[in-house]
Image (tube, helix red, strand yellow):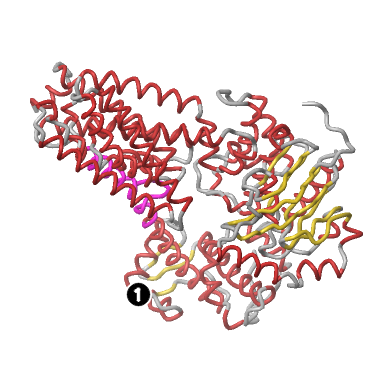
Amino acid sequence: MENVIDFFSFSDPNVRYVTLGIIFIMACAAMVGTFTFLTKKSLLGDAIAHAVLPGICVGFMLAGTKNPFVLIPAAFAFGWLSLLCIDFITNKSRIKEDTAIGLVLSLFFAIGIFLLTIIQKNGNANQSGLDHFLFGKAAALVMGDIIAFSIVALLLMLLTLLFFKEFTLISFDKNFAISSGVPVRALEILQTGMIVLTVVIGIQAVGVVLMAAVLITPAAVARYWTDNIKTMLAIALLTGVFSGIAGAYLSYSAPNMPTGPWIVIFISTLALLSFFLSPKKGIINKILKQKRYKRQIQDENVLKTLYQLGEKTNQFFLSQQEASISDKRFFAKNILSNSLHRLMRNGFVTKQKNAWQLTDAGKLRGQRLVKIHRLWELYLTTYANIAPDHVHEDADTIEHFLTPELEAALEQQLNFPEKDPHQTIIPYQ
Amino acid sequence: MANIKLNIPALEIHDLTVAFDRKPVLWNIDLTLPQGKLVGIIGPNGAGKSTLIKSVMGLLPLSSGYVKLFDQDLATVRNKVSYVPQRNSVDWDFPVSVLDVVLMGRYAGLGLFKKIRPADKEMAMDCLRKVGMENFANRQISQLSGGQQQRTFLARSLAQQADVYFMDEPFAGVDAATEKTIIQLLQSMTQQGKTIIVVHHDLHAVTSYFDWLVMLNTRLVAHGATSEIFTRENLQHTYGGKLTLLSDVGELFKREELPNREM
């Protein structure tokens, strides 16, 4: 608890640096990542993140200290070099882009680890903490980093705002963008530069290995909750920044914990929650919807059976025992009883002394189901050339889900026929 | 941009060859199309119909030859030219609305750094009205049917207010009613002097739709007024498989990595 107060009062200047730095990084990553995600170039962020490690090492070797104004350009150069290699391999050989990314990513990373080992062996006191670039340590951020990050963050934010409509267009339909004269090539180079910059400032706090998750996951979370690209950008920003602060806090309260993994665990949890809970695309909603449909089918089948029992005697409001309903059409005992009670609550049937009878509304609904069933059978035999003994099952499903508009269209097209293919009367009002 | 004279051709293609992975898909195309016509590009699968309009739009590198629009390079007349890509060339699960897509037709004209103005929105709505999609303006694009997607693309193209339109299979996967709406719209546009060039995937209604035809099968078989060139003989040349030798030679170029032109 003390930790919480210490951290969130931001009285410790270190905490201020760390939190600010993380906010800048996560905001950049979410903004840039949204377009990477929409362009389906998620893997590219991963490649760049691994490829900048040798750049960091070379930068350190040149400067002799962890000066961000040397490290960032050096890392940028290597990130860019890796992209040129990927492009070269893809264009000049039969190797496809995903394989090229894999090749370049591992080679650059290997060189990075190699250089890192050399630096650590040679005993420069300033090198301590250079290995934080692997998994990230936000607590290692200093004032100089924060200044550099804020400049980069402002720059990226400005570029995203300025080119928002062009970036959107290129992500959606690149060929149209080229054909209409939008400078696609230049904007793509700019976009790639933005990814590289984001990765370069991000890895100190998040680490090379996990940078891709920080880029892509906020956008993936946001996509679950909206169909509007501006809202998506905003949600991605919030998700990223929130996870960043949470990760920084956890890493602060347990000093030996790297920040990167905590941030990634946080965003990934949000992604998992979205996967289950999103109102439109979430799994839980899909399951509930299927359950509702299943119930609707059961209830309507019971109504239809009651109506068909009435059809025999032309008396629709007679009381029926559960046993005689099951005789007409088999229902498992508890399913039938559940359905009947639900129908009673909704006013489609009433119960008198263990027997059930249709209400006016219940009869009407049963009749509509029977009508649609028979019309659909006739439609299939007439227009789709399907044999009369093959149409029943199809009609059994359609009857539950046909919209009133389609129902009217069906009646129109068949011109209100009297009988279905099995010579049964089709009931209208 | 000076006004365009009526007597110069809308499109002139000179000795155009285009190759994929060294295999030529278009050989030595020489073609001139007049202004104000509704032109159909027809030919079998793999004939290079889409490739032809993509290379005119500068989307593919040319192995040889050049393309002129209104006697100028594409770069100088780009704002007079509109392109409708194949409907399935984009991901329709993209988080934008129908109106957003149509507004994309205004971006290039607006230029970088400029915001969408109310006038652009009204223009976009007007284009949606022309294709009968005004009630779908705020609909998310993933909820559209194939015909509605096609009409959205068409509206985006109209919003460019061009003089020549290149459309890649605008009738693919479209219901009969939509096809009729689209063709009527295109015909009324040509009456206003616009030139419309359409890649068409089948032969039905060719004579009633197009007043000018380009018959293509890797090389140009014929081009001219539909009434003159839509003949049994030309159809046989286009679809009859007489050109398998040509495609065999193309395969050879690809397999042996031969240069498409003398070095």
Residue A251 higher or lower than A290, as above or below = above
Left or right position of A96 against A124:
right
Which residue appears at 56% of the width and 65% of the height? B256
Q: Residue B193: x, y in percent?
A: 85, 39
Name the foreground residue: A84 vs A253: A84
Q: Chain of mark 1?
A: A
Q: Nearer the viewer, residue B94 or A4?
A: B94
Q: Residue furthest front?
A: B263
Residue B223 in which image quadrant: bottom right
* Residue A315 location, quadrant: bottom right
State yes or no: residue B60 in magenta: no
Instruction: Answer few, some or many: residues within 10 Å of disc 1's Cα (few below 14, many 20 plus, some between 14 and 19).
Output: few
Left or right, A130 with reference to B243: left
Q: Amino acid at mark 1?
A: Ala
Q: Residue at x 65, y 41 (%)?
A: B135
* Residue with the most extreme right position: B228
Residue A194 spot, x, y in % from top left:
40, 31
Q: Along the horizontal axis of the image, is A112 left or right of A44?
A: left
Reply above or below: B19 against A205: below
Q: Is residue A397 above or below residue B261?
A: below
- In the rendered image, which quarter contains the C terminus of chain A? bottom right
Residue A266 located within the stretch drawn in magenta: yes
Which residue is depicted at the point 62% across and 24% down?
B117
Residue A428 found in image quarter: bottom right
Helix, strand or loop: magenta stretch: helix
Percent coordinates x, y for residue B189 in the rendering: 81, 42
Give the residues drawn in magenta, as a range: A263-287
Residue at x 59%, y 58% (from the top left corner): B22
- Residue on which disc 1 sits: A332
Question: Residue B153 location in percent, x, y?
Answer: 65, 45
